[in-house]
Every structure is written in structure tokens, then in C-alpha cells.
């Protein structure tokens, strides 16, 4: 198995709009679904309480909408991913199929957890995001290109400027976003450094 970390310069795919400010991690993945040994299977529980009623009957939600099945670019509003700092939230989104998120703003820890999975969190102003969400509604089968390197989002005939946190942009485009893989690929150097530390029992 290769430990090589892919460079993520851009992400392309169809979109899914999830509207609303302050959508927290408990809405993204309710706590009762976090009692798992691995993250496998979490995708089906993304936004579960927004998608299903108490009888598990589906409600009107973009993640239930047949038009957006297979989408990989999520368009959200302000302060997305706020609340508890649970890594299960981006894990659930990734396992549902999300590869990039465009929004007005993100909770810092949520954005960091997304980066650890190679998911860009790209920001733009309210009007830009609202127009993107409306375009997705009207063109569910057309692709969006999120260019991490150039900091642009392109859809249809429109290209808009966006912002990628500089540290995130460097990590993604240089292929150094997966710290676990980095440590595994540099295991000898890690062992050497550990041997030098008086407080590490090797």
C-alpha cells in the first residue's frame, strides 16, 4: 500500500446546496451515530435528523433529493460546522460523497478536520454562495470546478473568486495534508527523533 499523499489542486463534480447558517456538527452527524469503531458507513447518517422524521420517513432535504445523488461539491452558508469538534462530521460528509465544500464561512476546527481528509473548505461572500446554490438547483447535472490553487470556483459560464486559507492551500497543493501518512512515510526519521528525546521510552 502506497503512503504517497495526492496533491489536490482542484476538485470537480456536481453540486448539492444545503442552506442555513450555523449548521453545527450535531446536525451534520447526530451524536448517537458516533458510537462506532471505524468511520465506515457514516455517510448514510449525514444530516440524519434533518432528512428523516421520528418514524424514519424521509423529509424534504437536499441529501434526500434524487437530483443531487452523486454530488461531490457541497454549497453551504455561514459558520458551517460549528459546535462540537467532532471529526465524525467531515468523515460522514466524505463518506456520503463530498470532496469539496464552498461556503460563506466555516468553524475553524471543522475546517481543520476537513483538511485532514483532503477536503478543501473554500469561502466566498453571501451573494456569491447564494448564486451558486441557485445555479445548482437549476443545473443539478452540471459540474462545478473548485480550483484550490487559483482560488476560483467555476460553474456554467461563470468563474468567481474564492478564498482558500493559505496554510490549507499549501498543504493541499503540495500533498502534505495527511499528517498520518506523512509520519508513516517518514517512520525512520520519527524513530530517530523519538530516540533523542529523554521523555520517550523506545
Image (cartoon, rainbow, N blue to C red):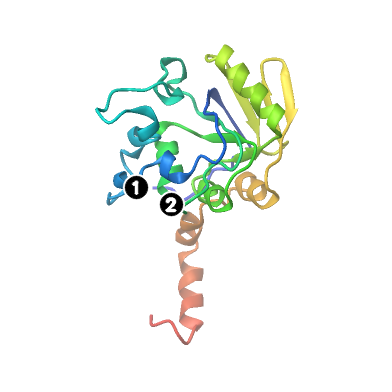
Please tell me whether residue 32 is drawn above or below residue 44 in the rendered image.
below
Classify the position of the C terminus by image quarter.
bottom left
Residue at (57%, 37%) from the top-left corner?
21
Residue placed most toward the observer, 106 or 120: 106
Residue at the left extreme? 55
Local secondary structure at mark 1: helix
From the image, tell me which residue sits under label 1.
31
Q: Are marks 2 and 1 in contact (CB under 8 Å)?
A: yes
Residue 39, by quadrant, is top left
Rendered view: 137 above or below 25? above
Q: Which residue is mark 2?
A: 86
Seen from the viewer's position, the closer of residues 20 and 117 is 20
Residue 120 at x, y percent in the picture: 58, 40
Is residue 160 toward the left or the right of residue 83 in the image? right
Identify which residue is drawn at 69% across, 35% down.
Answer: 124
- Nearer to us in this view, 54 or 126: 54
C-alpha distance separating marks 2 and 1: 9 Å
Q: Give the residue drawn at x 61%, y 35%.
A: 103
**Residue located at (59% from left, 44% from top):** 106
- Counting labels gives 2
Secondary structure category for the residue under label 2: loop
Query: Which percent across, then down, holds residue 51?
Result: 37, 28
Q: Earlier in the sequence, mark 2 or mark 1?
A: 1
Measured from the top left, where is residue 81 in percent x and y?
A: 52, 44
Q: Residues within 10 Å of mark 1 (few under 14, many from 20)?
A: some
Crowding at mark 2 (Cα within 10 Å: few <14, some 14-19, many 20+)? some
Q: Residue furthest bottom?
A: 198
Amino acid at each position: 500500500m502506497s503512503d504517497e499523499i495526492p496533491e489536490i489542486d482542484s476538485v470537480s463534480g456536481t453540486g448539492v446546496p444545503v442552506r442555513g447558517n450555523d449548521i453545527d456538527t450535531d446536525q451534520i452527524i447526530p451524536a448517537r451515530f458516533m458510537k462506532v469503531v471505524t468511520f465506515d458507513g457514516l455517510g448514510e447518517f449525514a444530516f440524519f435528523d434533518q432528512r428523516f422524521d421520528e418514524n424514519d420517513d424521509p423529509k424534504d432535504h437536499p441529501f434526500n433529493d434524487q437530483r443531487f445523488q452523486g454530488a461531490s461539491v457541497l454549497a453551504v452558508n455561514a459558520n458551517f460546522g460549528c459546535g462540537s469538534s467532532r471529526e465524525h462530521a467531515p468523515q460522514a460528509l466524505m463518506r456520503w460523497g463530498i470532496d469539496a465544500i464552498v461556503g460563506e464561512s466555516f468553524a475553524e476546527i471543522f475546517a481543520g478536520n476537513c483538511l485532514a481528509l483532503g477536503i478543501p473548505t473554500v469561502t466566498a461572500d453571501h451573494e456569491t454562495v447564494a448564486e451558486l446554490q441557485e445555479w445548482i438547483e437549476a443545473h443539478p447535472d452540471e459540474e462545478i470546478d473548485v480550483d484550490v490553487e487559483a482560488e476560483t470556483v467555476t460553474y456554467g459560464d461563470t468563474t468567481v473568486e474564492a478564498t482558500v486559507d493559505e496554510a490549507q492551500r499549501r498543504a493541499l497543493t503540495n500533498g502534505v495534508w495527511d499528517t498520518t501518512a506523512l509520519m508513516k512515510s517518514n517512520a525512520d526519521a520519527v524513530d530517530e527523533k523519538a530516540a533523542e528525546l529523554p521523555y520517550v521510552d523506545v
